[in-house]
Amino acid sequence: MTSKRAILYAAVACLMLAIGCGRSNMARQRDEARNRWAVSRAEMVTKLAEGCYQRGEVGRAQQHLDEIINSGAPYAPLYTLAARMAVDKGNLDGARTFAENAKAIDPKSPEARYVLGVVEQMLGHTDRALEEYSEASRLDPAESKYVLAEAEMRVAAGQAEQAAESLGDAAGRTPGKAEVHAALGDVLARLNRHADAAASYRTALRLEPQRGDIKERLAIALFYSGAYAEAEAALAELAPSGPDFATQWVQRMRGDCLLALRRLPEARALYQTLANAQPDSAAPLVGLARCDILDNRIPAAKTLLEQALARSPRHAEANALLGCLLVAEGKPAEASPHLSVAAQDLKFADRAAAEHLLAKVQGEK
């Protein structure tokens, strides 16, 4: 009798356990179905909101987002869009919260990481922005905007070499992306690797030959790499197409190329044209003075440099050149104040030479 009761109790217990498990499974299935429906609905509404946002219907887009956000649907793109719209409104704290929600929902979403990086960058958190951009780039290395954002932050963090390495890898993975090659050129130019920068710009220009900005950067890189003949040809092509302010710097740099190539009559003609067009500018007069120095017309060069300094007394190159001429004439006392002005200009390319000559002059006093 006892044995039969034990068997009966065991059967009842098994039945109760089975019923409990069945209820648990049913509840889990209901929850999963509810979540699937919530995500599907969130996906649909997010697409509607994205369309409104792209058409400039920000109010309607926000209504769609508010509706689905309040439901708590676990859909990362919903929160990335909400973060982007919050950024547009200047609500960076809210944008950060939305972006962190997107990251928490889907840690492997490169877009969530990227948007969070944008917010952190705008908040001035360079290290955090770099971390998020780097992870976005790692998750989707084929997307150029992630690589470009990472490189920008590396440069801002003082890691230009690492930025160049990252962009070089990206250029190898996606050889058809002009923006990646152009960005690599920018970083290499920043590192004073101008010949390498020119090579990157050439590649970018082959991919997008209509890009005038890349043509300009290529010409500058060629100039600073010492490829004066190629730089002069590129600058000659640029000059007619630019507005007046752009034409002036192009022509000045082109004149410098012609000087380096010892094509003095052409250089002089360019500088004279600029001097006529810019009666208050010292730069064209300095260019003409350099032509005279190379032609061994020293008195004429001194006159031009004095005129340039009358227009711009702190002009570093004019002071340096006049100082050098005065030293050559055996007038160190007159040269010293001019060399001192040049040596104090941190942006002057030949500052080190001016400092050296100044030290020599002062040591001879």
Image (cartoon, rainbow, N blue to C red):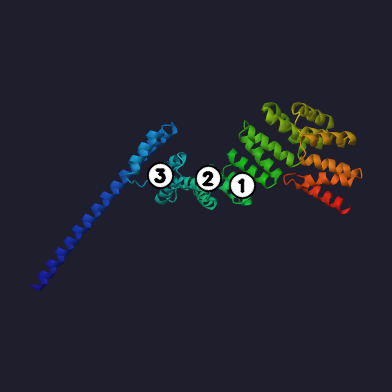
Q: Is residue 17 above or below residue 62?
A: below
- Residue at position x 51%, y 45% from top? 122
Badge 1: residue crowd in 10 Å (few <14, some 14–19, many ≥20): some
Q: Secondary structure at mark 3?
A: helix
Q: Amino acid at mark 3?
A: Tyr
- Residue at position x 52%, y 47% from top? 121
Q: Residue furthest left?
A: 1
- For disc 2, the marked residue is 146
Q: Residue furthest right?
A: 330
Q: Is residue 48 above or below residue 166?
A: above
Q: Give coordinates of residue 258: x percent, y percent.
A: 80, 34
Q: Amino acid at mark 1?
A: Gly
Badge number at residue 79: 3
- Of badges 3 and 1, the one in the foreground is 3
Q: Give coordinates of residue 331: x percent, y percent.
A: 90, 45
Q: Nearer the viewer, residue 12 or 91?
A: 91
- Of badges 1 and 2, the one in the foreground is 2
Q: Are marks 1 and 2 in contact (CB under 8 Å)?
A: no
Q: Earlier in the sequence, mark 3 or mark 1?
A: 3
Q: Give coordinates of residue 242: x percent, y percent.
A: 67, 28
